[in-house]
Image (cartoon, rainbow, N blue to C red):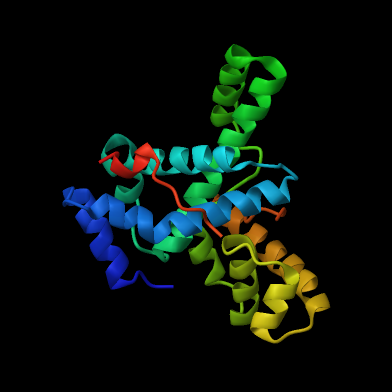
Amino acid sequence: MPLRDIDRQLIDRCLRKDPGAWNDFVDRYMGLIYHVIHHLAHARSIVLNAADTEDLAAEIFLQIVDDDYATLRRFKGASSLPTYLTVVARRICVKELIRRHREAELGHAHAHRAVLNQDRGEQAEAIASAEEVERMLEDLPEREAEVVRLYHLQYQNYRQIARQLGIPENSVGPVLAKARQHLRRTAEQRGAPAVPESQNAPSTSGSWRSAR
């Protein structure tokens, strides 16, 4: 999916640090960030209260701002910005949930060390970059690519995918399995990570809104 002009302009405004650009960015993508958090928590059977969700959203937005918007500077436009941000948010959220879980079990010092070790090795849940996923999807038939995109990047369930694509719900799983095998072979040939196998934003005024 090509980069939309409105998103390119928003990125450029943020990188130039235009007045109000960051607030516009947050307003546009806050719903997406909350959707990623809620979906990931649900998939891992984690119960989050409003404060937990707010903290995770703040961490995601702060990391996007960090190092002079390095996350936005790394975006090359090979995928849509929402797709890219979905993968970025999911990666940050996974790491933060791991850190919190380790803190609860081991205490702060041990948890910090565990997360550093996690970063050095393979992440608990392999997450390919959005742009690499989009490139790999080019090798799939159109219908299979759309199923993978809806499931892995937009986090729709089988019923939602079947309804959107007009296919039987019981056909979604086999399509995903076939596509994953193809993508895994492609990823191995390219030396890139494969697509992983696993599978109502509230209003907020967190301090990250004015981070820049």
In which quarter of the view is residue 126 placed? top right
Front residue of 57 and 162: 57
**Residue at x 63% of width, y 41% of height:** 49
Which image quadrant for residue 169?
bottom right
What percent of the width, then of the height, locates residue 16?
16, 50
Query: Is residue 178 found left or right of 141 in the rendered image?
Result: right
**Which residue does the image show at 72% across and 79% down from the upper left?**
162
Question: Residue 144's spot in the image, x, y percent?
Answer: 65, 76
Q: Measured along the vertical axis of the image, is residue 119 above or below residue 129?
A: above
- Give whichever of 189, 91 is nearer the camera: 91
Residue 31 x, y percent position in the rendering: 48, 58
Q: Is residue 1 above or below residue 101?
A: below
Write the residue at 55% across / 38% down.
51
Residue at x-position 47% and y-position 61%: 83
Q: Is residue 210 left or right of residue 151?
A: left
Q: Is residue 200 above or below residue 96?
A: below
- In the rendered image, the residue lying farthest to the bottom is 166
* Residue 193 seen in render: no
Q: Residue furthest right?
A: 170
